[in-house]
RNA sequence: GCCCCCGUAGCUCAGUAGGAUAGAGCAACGGUUUCCUAAACCGUAGGCCACAGGUUCGAAUCCUGUCGGGGGUACCA
């Protein structure tokens, strides 16, 4: 997605190319980028290098001809957006924009009624985003927290670029893991009656079940000497209800909500497993070996063939997962995005292989994969294990640091990199960390508007933006020009950290501007122009914070 | 063994179809407030972009290999 200024500059380059060579440039030649040095102008084009082999000329020669063609155009057209162009280095064309061209970009931003940064790239297509999907066997950990924030921010981002988004949580509320959970809870319960039993192998050791047991004791007030069918049903239901409740609370505290909670048990009840197996069989996707049924995964680009139906007749997780995705497809989503941890890699390739052999289009299902979170405290990395009861809960982390800090830390690194969450730093620097920094920039703007006569802020379309001639002002506008592109990139490339980065950079630029130039001044026209700029910055920062799920405080 | 991700300043990390002299934050050091919130700003210092080759006008970025970290390679979920 091109920004307004990029579109403008590319038009200029194309026009100069046509003039110089009497031919349209290849689309691949049309590439520009903002410069990182003022002496290189505002935007730079490398078209001379890219076109060298096709035109059979040296980049410097091509650049020279483009330079003179463009210079002609600039001199004959007083309204040309480019002030001047320089040929530099191996053949770069460095373009210096007229302030009016930059100011015009701000004018367009102020004139849009849509939330700033939004676009219609998605064309109203539907996308389902599934994330967290932790089974209700214990509280969420910090690892789940990263996925929760990642999925939630991606979902919001897709909404901003014009998709219809549904957030879904998939959970398993019956089966072997739940039986183990029920039995573990029963053991804890009996302990309250001095009736000692061992927590089953692979059971759940965490202390959190003791609390549940204590609650249960108050309601039931009698021991269950045997873990028989009645006890099993009771403890299973209690444990699942209680854990689901806890998970929803943990997510709620973090500001994460779902449109649908999808029960795996429903898939079984509806006969989806059998239907899916028939479908795969009919498409020659499975074979039998050693009494089990296997998926022909490798032949369709997946990891090595895996068991779908065990020799005892029970379906594997993969089998159910495939059925789940077929169900998603039947529900009519145009796209489906699963947010998952890196440990599911093999599984993902197998699901994709299954869908491929059923003839699903390749782009229908995407995975956003993230690496794990380590907590660092006192210089020590903590290894976590839910079953062994060694973990820091998301709940404790959120209570400790607050929603905004947790969300910012979780989202500020690219998903495919490991995240070292330094607890000491997050606490010690809490008054000075990036999330606060962005919020404070927003707050400063709000503060200025509170002090402003409201009649002056009613219509910025009347502001004389040509008064915004300071270097810092033009740079801020150029940054604002990029905002919709950043939002699109963050969504489509599964890179929400880019938005966090952008918010930080824009805040930095604003703070520096604030420090150097006053907004509330005697010069009414200039003040109005600056307020218009601030309104646009506030729009971008407010949207940044909103998408990241952070508060945009009026005061701090 | 094979597959996926990562390796950039002391620490945590950005670096956008390969672009000109590699950037932030934190930590360190030194400055800034009669003025819109100093939760801020300005400056100094800090680097063989893990290593070795290759591709080309040009590589942190692409390819190959090596080393290091994480994950996967279950009739677990």
Image (cartoon, rainbow, N blue to C red):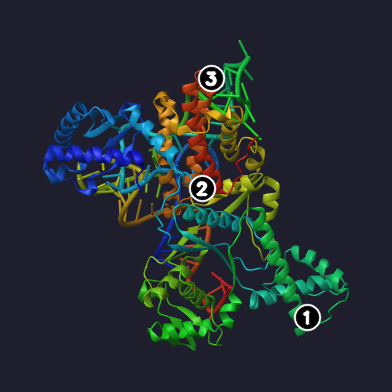
Q: Which mark is residue A231?
A: 1
Q: Could you tell me which secondary element the residue under label 3 belongs to?
A: loop
Q: Is residue A392 visible?
A: no
**Depth check, front residue: A70 or A243:** A70
The chain holding disc 2 is A
Q: Could you tell me which secondary element the residue under label 2 belongs to?
A: loop
Q: Residue at x 45, y 50 (%)?
A: A490
Q: Earlier in the sequence, mark 1 or mark 2?
A: 1
Badge 1 local density, few (<14 within 10 Å), some, or many (20+)? Answer: some
Q: Is residue A111 visible?
A: yes
Q: Position of residue A357 (x, y in %)?
A: 37, 77
Q: Nearer the viewer, mark 3 or mark 1?
A: 3
Q: Where A402 sits versus A286, above or below?
A: above
The alpha-carbon separation of the residues under discs 1 and 2 comes to 46 Å
The alpha-carbon separation of the residues under discs 2 and 3 comes to 40 Å
Q: Which quadrant of the structure image shows residue A87?
A: top left
**Depth check, front residue: A323 or A124:** A124
**Depth check, front residue: A179 or A46:** A46
Residue at the spot of label 2 = A413
Q: Position of residue A309 (x, y in %)?
A: 51, 83
2 and 3 marks on the same chain? yes
Q: Which mark is residue A300?
A: none
3 and 1 marks on the same chain? yes
Q: Could you tell me which secondary element the residue under label 1 belongs to?
A: helix
Q: Residue at x 44, y 26 (%)?
A: A472
The reply to whether discs 2 and 3 touch (Cβ–Cβ < 8 Å) is no
Q: Earlier in the sequence, mark 3 or mark 1?
A: 1
């Amino acid at each position: 997605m091109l920004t307004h200024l990029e579109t403008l500059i590319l038009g200029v380059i194309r026009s100069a190319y046509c003039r110089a060579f009497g031919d349209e440039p290849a689309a691949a030649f049309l590439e520009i980028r903002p410069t990182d040095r003022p002496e290189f102008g505002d935007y730079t084009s490398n078209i001379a290098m890219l076109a060298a082999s096709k035109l059979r000329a040296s980049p410097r020669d091509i650049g020279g001809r483009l330079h003179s063609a463009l210079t002609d155009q600039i001199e004959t057209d007083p309204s040309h957006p480019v002030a001047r162009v320089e040929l530099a280095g191996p053949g770069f064309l460095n373009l210096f924009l007229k302030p009016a061209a930059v100011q015009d970009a701000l004018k367009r931003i102020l004139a849009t009624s849509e939330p700033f940064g939004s676009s219609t790239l998605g064309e109203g297509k539907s996308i389902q985003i599934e994330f967290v999907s932790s089974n209700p066997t214990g509280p969420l950990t910090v690892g789940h927290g990263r996925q929760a924030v990642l999925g939630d921010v991606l979902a919001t981002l897709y909404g901003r670029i014009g998709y219809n988004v549904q957030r879904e949580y998939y959970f398993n509320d019956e089966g072997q893991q739940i039986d183990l959970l029920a039995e573990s809870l029963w053991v804890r319960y009996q302990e309250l009656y001095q009736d000692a039993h061992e927590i089953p192998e692979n059971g759940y050791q965490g202390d959190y079940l003791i609390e549940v047991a204590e609650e249960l004791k108050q309601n039931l007030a009698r021991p269950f000497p045997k873990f028989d069918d009645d006890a099993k049903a009771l403890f299973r239901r209690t444990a699942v209800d209680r854990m689901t409740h806890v998970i929803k609370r943990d997510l709620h505290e973090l500001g994460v909500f779902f449109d649908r909670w999808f029960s795996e048990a429903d898939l079984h009840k509806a006969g989806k497993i059998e239907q899916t197996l028939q479908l795969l069989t009919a498409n020659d996707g499975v074979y039998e070996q050693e009494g089990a049924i296997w998926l022909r995964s490798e032949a369709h680009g997946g990891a090595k063939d895996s068991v779908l139906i065990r020799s005892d007749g029970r379906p594997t997780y993969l089998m159910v997962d495939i059925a789940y995705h077929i169900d998603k497809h039947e529900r009519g989503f145009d796209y489906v995005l699963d947010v998952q941890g890196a440990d599911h890699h093999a599984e993902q390739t197998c699901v994709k292989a299954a869908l491929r052999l059923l003839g699903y289009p390749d782009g229908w299902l995407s995975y956003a994969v993230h690496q794990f979170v380590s907590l660092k405290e006192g210089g020590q990395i903590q290894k976590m294990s839910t079953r062994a009861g060694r973990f820091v809960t998301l709940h404790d982390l959120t209570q400790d640091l607050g929603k905004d800090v947790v969300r910012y830390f979780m989202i500020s690194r690219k998903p495919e990199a490991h995240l070292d969450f330094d607890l000491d730093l997050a606490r010690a620097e809490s008054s000075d960390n990036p999330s606060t920094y962005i919020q404070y920039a927003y707050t400063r703007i709000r503060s200025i508007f509170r002090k402003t006569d409201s009649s002056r802020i009613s219509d910025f379309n009347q502001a004389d933006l040509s008064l915004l001639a300071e270097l810092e002002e033009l740079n801020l506008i150029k940054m604002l020009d990029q905002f919709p592109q950043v939002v699109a990139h963050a969504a489509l490339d599964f890179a929400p950290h880019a938005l966090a980065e952008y918010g930080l950079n824009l805040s930095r630029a604003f703070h520096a501007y604030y420090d150097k130039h006053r907004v509330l001044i005697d010069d009414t026209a200039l003040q109005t122009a600056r307020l218009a700029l601030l309104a646009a910055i506030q729009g971008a920062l407010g949207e940044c914070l909103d998408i990241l799920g952070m508060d945009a405080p009026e005061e701090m």
